[in-house]
Image (spheres, grey):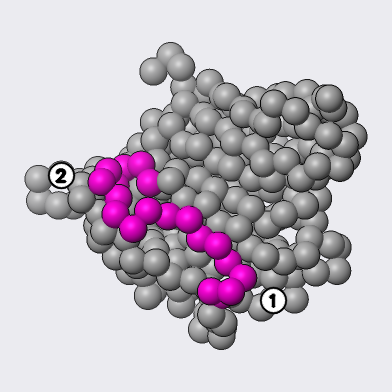
Amino acid sequence: MYSEAAMQDSSEPTRRTMLGALGVLGVAAMGGGLAAPRHAAAQPLGLQETGEEALRRVFGGRPMRDGAGAIKFEIPAIAENGALVQTSVTVESPMTPATYVKHVWIVADKNRIPVVFRATLTPEAGRAFVGATIRLGETGDVRAIAEQSDGTLLAVTREVKVTVGGCGG
Amino acid sequence: MGDVGKIRIRLPSSIKAGDIVQARTLVIHPMERVERDAQGKLIQRNYSYIHTVIVTYLGKTIVTFETTQAVSENPFFSFSFRATDPGQLKIQFLDTTGGKYEGVVDIKFS
């Protein structure tokens, strides 16, 4: 209705009225999901959901192999401060254009926003190594999931005890 | 808060051609977490947090991180890259308020 009103002023939609209409649509879209990232990502990451829902949404039930032999997931077993937890993930894998690690996810099952990050790697990285300081809301499983360039998913899970939660909300 | 967007990049003290280098970067950013009112309802507003980190070396993307509010305040990110030639390593941080912060370091061989 906004765009109709705008179009009555001039016989054809000018750039400005079109932009205005787009703006209204944008605002309407934003009202929808609160935690959804504002940038137009094909796959929204930070949603409020359970760990199970997040895994189903992101990986759609694709089989996951045990990555214990391939993934080195460094995370403290006891996190005294959930607001700042050091993590790093190293995947033993060649990093050549033919075979490399494409994505690394960290998913904290008990967080209100379980998907912590998704890293996208290229063969130029030389080694499949990523790390970040993350937040953990409460004691629970944290998963490191690696996707290789052929689509194979590898996962390792660690239980982390959180003394003081760090997600507040 | 004046420091938001300040970036530090840490590299090994000496890098040789062909090395796989591990780097660590810090950005000063509040990474606002979701707030709830007394009834436990989410407060709807545009929270300021970093949603994307892009690492480029010699103009080529090495690693990108897509991040959520589950990443800590003033976050560190680590990654590795193969140091093939001297040149620029650039890290960009994008946040939900439209902020774009950039840190650059020159890779030199010793």
Label annotation for residue A151: 1
Q: Is A106 within the magenta?
A: no
Q: Nearer the viewer, residue A99 or A44?
A: A99
The chain under label 2 reads B
> Crowding at label 1, few (<14), some or many (≥20) Cα neighbours within 10 Å?
few
> Is residue B25 something that shows in the picture?
yes
Residue A30: horizontal and vertical position, in percent?
44, 49
The chain under label 1 reads A
Could you tell me which residue is drawn at 78 percent across and 32 percent down? B15
Kindly indicate whether the residues beneath marks 2 and 1 are on one polypeptide chain: no
Q: Which residue is mark 2?
A: B37
Tell me, yes or no, whether the two marked residues, 2 and 1, touch with CB atoms within 8 Å.
Answer: no
Could you tell me which residue is drawn at 40 percent across and 41 percent down? B72
> Crowding at label 2, few (<14), some or many (≥20) Cα neighbours within 10 Å?
few
C-alpha span from label 2 to label 1: 42 Å
Label annotation for residue A141: none
Q: In the drawing, does residue A162 fall left or right of residue A1?
A: left
Residue A81: horizontal and vertical position, in percent?
27, 43
State which region is magenta.
A67-85
Task: Report the amino acid beneath label 2.
Answer: Asp
The image shows residue B83, relative to residue A143, as above or below, that is above
